[in-house]
Image (cartoon, helix red, strand yellow):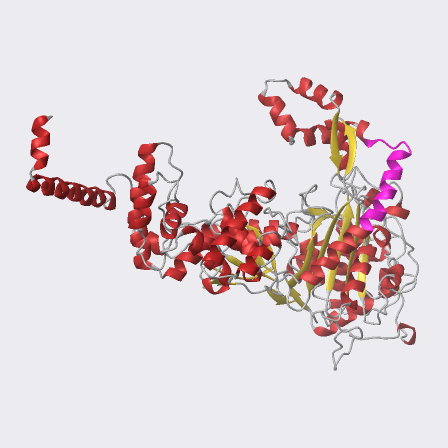
Amino acid sequence: MNRITTWLKQPINLWKLFGMFILSIIVFFTLVRIGAFGKLPSFEEIENPNSNLATEVYSADSVLIGKYFVDNRSNVAYEDLPPFLVKALVANEDERFYDHSGIDLLGTLRAVVKLGKGGGGSTITQQLAKNMFHNRARNIVQRIMQKAKEYVISVMLERRYTKEEIIAMYFNTFDFVNNAVGIESASRIYFNKKPKELSIEEAAMFVGMLQNPSYYNPRRFGQRTLERRATVLRKLMERGDITNTQFETLKDNPIELNFHPETANDGLAPYFRMIVAEQLKKWAKENKKTDGTEYNIYTDGLKIYTTINTRMQKYAEEAATQHLARYQKYMDAQFKSGWNPWETKDGKRILETACKYTDRWYALKEQGLSKDDILKNFKSDKHRMKVFTYSGLKDTTLTPYDSVKYYKSFLQVGVMAVEPYTGYVRAWVGGPNFEYFKYDHCNINTKRQVGSTFKPIVYALAVDNGWSPCMVIAPGQVRIGNWAPRGGSGGPQTLIQALKTSNNQMAAYITKQFGVNPIIDLSRRLFISSDLPPYAPICLGASDISLEEMMAAYSVFPSAGICTKPQYILRIEDKDGNVVQNFATKMKEVFNDNIAYNMCQVMNGPVGPGGTAAGLRGYFNYPVEMAGKTGTTNKNTDAWFIGYTPELLCGVWVGCDDPMIRFLYTGTGQGGRAAMPVFGMFMQKAYSDPKLALNKNAKFFRPSDSSLVKDLCETENETLISGGDTGNWGQVDEENLDSEY
């Protein structure tokens, strides 16, 4: 000890010790810089930090309709930050921010001397480094090493970015809890505002949260958050950024949150966004970044620009909800009357399968329970729960098994609105409520029997082969091989008259004349890719086809013979605004404009007096020309209506997820009642909106040189054609019949 004391008394040795200390610090930080204590980010990573950015989905009218994210974060430029937010940050977190180069030696020394009680030594840049590149330290050793890395990274950040950019990055990376990562998300979630719209006291609250966002969570700890906000405001006053009068006024103002929680499911058009996400994942596998890596739609901050019109989407969702809220009562009445399909073999199988996909089933299975024991638990163990109703959530007590039955008994819906000339999807409603019913009923993979909505394709084949809409035909009772359709008269009718009443005999007669294969070939040209069995009942819509495909097929009529495939993504941009890919509508000419116009005249029948959708004008009363077709499948399992004006095509499907749950009577289950009202209400809302600027007097395009157009069938003297029994179409299922009439 005496030798050490003697050695230290020599000035030269003190300088040696000081030099060794300085050298050790230099060596230590050099080792830190070269990654001896753990990898540091490269200059490339500093310039392009790997922070999770939410992918944003925009409508055609430039509205943010939803996000895909791991962290709900979007970047905001410094120019879009309110001045008081920046001033409050500097005042509270780093008073010498504009004077240092990432490390505040005075602040660090103060923190060491006062053991952190006089404020932390971390600069804003250091805090940014921690937010971007480090996980939380678990012990004192890790904390020391983490601090050293923060020093090095801070210097690297200061060399690469301006002070303003560092402030923006800091606010963009901070987690304000409640699924609000970054100031853009936080402003919207807590106050339903953009950052630049924040008031002084709102900005002060966010800066106060920086110290500990969980501890100063305004939703849970309002009083302590208020006190912390007052501290921030006091700092602003002391620096002269606000007056004493402003401070005294603002510090006592209550925190008035306008809380809007966000999840990946929140926002407009949730079913649509789910389908877009699936398409984006496929796109990401086929299209790589410039460095060869795959895009990640949840972290890469892409911007997806879609064709959806927010006003039309809102109207479609409202129309679907309004109709189903009313029409569900008819389905409920069937169950109340004693109808119980769940006691059948198929019913029990459907319920058991549905139970197996619940979290409760998985949990009980993990506990080692057998299938029989799990089912017993499902049927006997009652629970208090909230269930969905169209009038709001309802408190009730049900067994899990009865809960599955309850939700399986709900009517489902699919609605698509498309601009026929461009193929742009303007509205997409895949179900009644996304939170409770996740299955989408619009997309190309969701197929249901289409019924009489398929008949216009059959009629179009005839018209394309020279048949006039005014041709009078007496098909009689048509038989094709061993199959004969039910429903409809075989007496003399024009094509217009026959489609108006959805005459099965006429559709069968046309099929008999041309064959099944030409119908299938035409369907393929109309972008229908679903399986179409080569049997005669195809003419009555006995095939399962998606709503998306039917919308493509119907687009050919109002578009002067040009068939357009529904298009719902316009372009994709990366996080820097660079266009990664543009998308174009797939289209092809299928008919000439004469044929398309004639089919518009034929399809005007069902929506006119005496047609299967004659009640449409009770919902939609503008003079614009309109055409369409109802569809009702065997045993009333599927109800359809697809209609169009010169500017807008809209298709609606209504039914239950499981075909065995159906309307017992055609009076309630037919397309003209179960589906058509959704179309009518949507069109009424859309055409009534002056901002959409739809033409209430629009007419279908009429070719100037038309030789086939016949406006007044009664003035024509067409030859009566009688049907006969020819052809052998093979063995078919007689249940595949259209029950509509």
Decide if residue 515 is on the left or right side of residue 127: right
Quadrant in which residue 516 is drawn: bottom right
Residue furthest out toward the bottom:
704
User: Could you say which is closer to the camera, residue 170 or residue 496?
Assistant: 170
- For residue 561, above or below residue 27: below
The number of callouts visible is: 0
Which residue is drawn at the image coordinates 30% and 45% (left, top)?
109
- Residue 117: percent from the left, percent from the top? 39, 40
Asked if the magenta segment contains residue 249, the reply would be no
Which residue corresponds to the image point at 56% horizontal and 60% vertical from the top-left?
A: 246
Residue 324 in the magenta stretch? The answer is yes
> Eyeballing the image, is 445 above or below 595?
above
Report x, y in % for residue 587.
61, 65
473 and 238: which is toward the camera: 238
Q: Residue at x 77, y 78 (%)?
A: 707
Q: Is residue 287 visible?
A: no
Tell me the magenta residue range: 323-341
Task: Give residue 247's quadrant in the image.
Answer: bottom right
Q: Is residue 91 above or below residue 634?
A: below
Q: Position of residue 424 (x, y in %)?
A: 64, 64
The answer to whether residue 157 shows anywhere in this view is yes
